[in-house]
Amino acid sequence: MIDNKMIEQNILACFLMTDYAKTFLTRVKPEWFKDWHRGLVKTMQDMYINNEPIGIHTLYQHYKDKAVELAKLTNMFVTDKHLEKELFIIESEYNRNLLLSEITKVKADWDLQEIQNHLEIINQNSRIKNNNQVLHISKVMAKKIDEIEERVKSGNKMKGLSTGWRSLDKYIGGWNKGNLVVVGGRPGMGKSALGLNLCADGQRFAKHLFVSVEMSADELAERMLADINNIENTKIRNANVDTNDLERMAQSIFNADFHIIDTKDNNVYNIISLLKVHRAKYGLDVVVIDYLQKLNAGGRDLRTNVGMASTALKNFARELGITVIALAQLNRDGKNARPELTELKESGQIEQDADVVLFPFRPSYYEDIKPDVEDAVVIIAKNRHGRLCDIPCTFEGGLTRYKENL
């Protein structure tokens, strides 16, 4: 049987005695250790970050009542050769105990979704995190060449999944794994409409999910019925349709192939947990979240909160290898001017996290009389994968639909 106490002591002895071992201080968590060892690890971490020497004499200033124990640690040191394996053992044991403890917190009166979310969160928290590997650039380049060759042979040269829009495929390379795409719009500009349109237009090529913390599932259904059947949204909302329209709408159900989540829980971490469960059950390539400023990430103020939510979504996209499309509000101050990156409401962190930023823009929105079909553009304002440009399109207000000009 493995003696975890002995392993802890070996690890601490390594931290005290070798510079190599000290580099692991930023990767460990004090809670992996027991009793006073937790505080000792935290003290050594602080000293390492502040570039202070770590040794028995400097630690004695913090732990004068543990002089004998510190001396024993130094006397135990033999080698740091097995340090990584020993760290893996105590992390595994900690995560195992954490998992067992959290499972007992499940209540009999919880509904299925609450239980699934709780189990998904503790499952993620209890997983061993892989340490970043140091790779030689030549190996990375060779792997990339192999990937490109495979795409050439298959005839599918685009790296990402098709968006359903030729122009977006051309300029951003489709929806790329691990990317955060921000669709920003001033109030009333139709960012929610564009997000829903992207789901409808891309559903043939990837598995999509639309998450709304603003619009209800009923409103989303009305918009989809209008879009697919070319029936004005107001007619559907007011049931101002005839028998032929009803038959068309009934048939159109088979042309809609993506999922929606209408949730009142705006906690970004709960939403991420829900998405992980959804992906396990149905698969997931692209998720649209409407919208960023509505999410709660526990920040002390609105600006910090939005930045934390943005970063959480970016990390989630990278972790699962999917594309996250986050809708975001712009400030109203721009009037009828073209939107700019500086207008992203509440946080510069959004711009920093985003791989692509798209701005739907309709100049006619600011006119007193709007045409039925408006000339519009989708502005590629940030693009880590290529050039910045405008994508000409139209906006049909009655159908709440953006459509690229082919």
Image (cartoon, grey):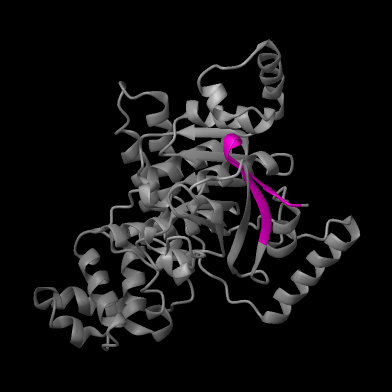
Q: Residue furthest left?
A: 65
Q: Nearer the viewer, residue 249 or 84?
A: 249
Q: Is 301 located above or below residue 57 in the figure? A: above
Predominant SS of the magenta segment: strand
Q: Residue at x 66, y 20 (%)?
A: 249
Residue 228 shown in magenta: no
Rendering quarter of residue 228: top right
Range shown magenta = 391-405
Q: Residue 168 in the image: x percent, y percent?
A: 69, 57
Q: Residue furthest front?
A: 369
Residue 393 shown in magenta: yes
Q: Is 375 located above or below residue 53 in the figure? A: above
Residue 69 placement, left or right of 190: left
Rendering quarter of residue 11: bottom left
Q: Is 301 located above or below residue 140 in the figure? A: above
Q: Residue at x 35, y 70 (%)?
A: 10
Residue 296 placement, left or right of 253: left
Q: Residue 286 in the image: x percent, y percent?
A: 60, 47
- Do we see residue 53 in this rendering? yes
Q: Residue furthest top?
A: 243
Q: Nearer the viewer, residue 184 or 26?
A: 184
Rendering quarter of residue 142: bottom right
Residue 218 placement, left or right of 322: left
Q: Residue at x 67, y 72 (%)?
A: 387
Q: Is 1 located above or below residue 49 in the figure? A: above
Q: Nearer the viewer, residue 181 or 66?
A: 181
Q: Residue at x 62, y 54 (%)?
A: 376
Q: Residue 183 in the image: x percent, y percent?
A: 53, 55
Q: Residue 131 in the image: x percent, y percent?
A: 50, 67
- Do we see residue 362 in this rendering? no
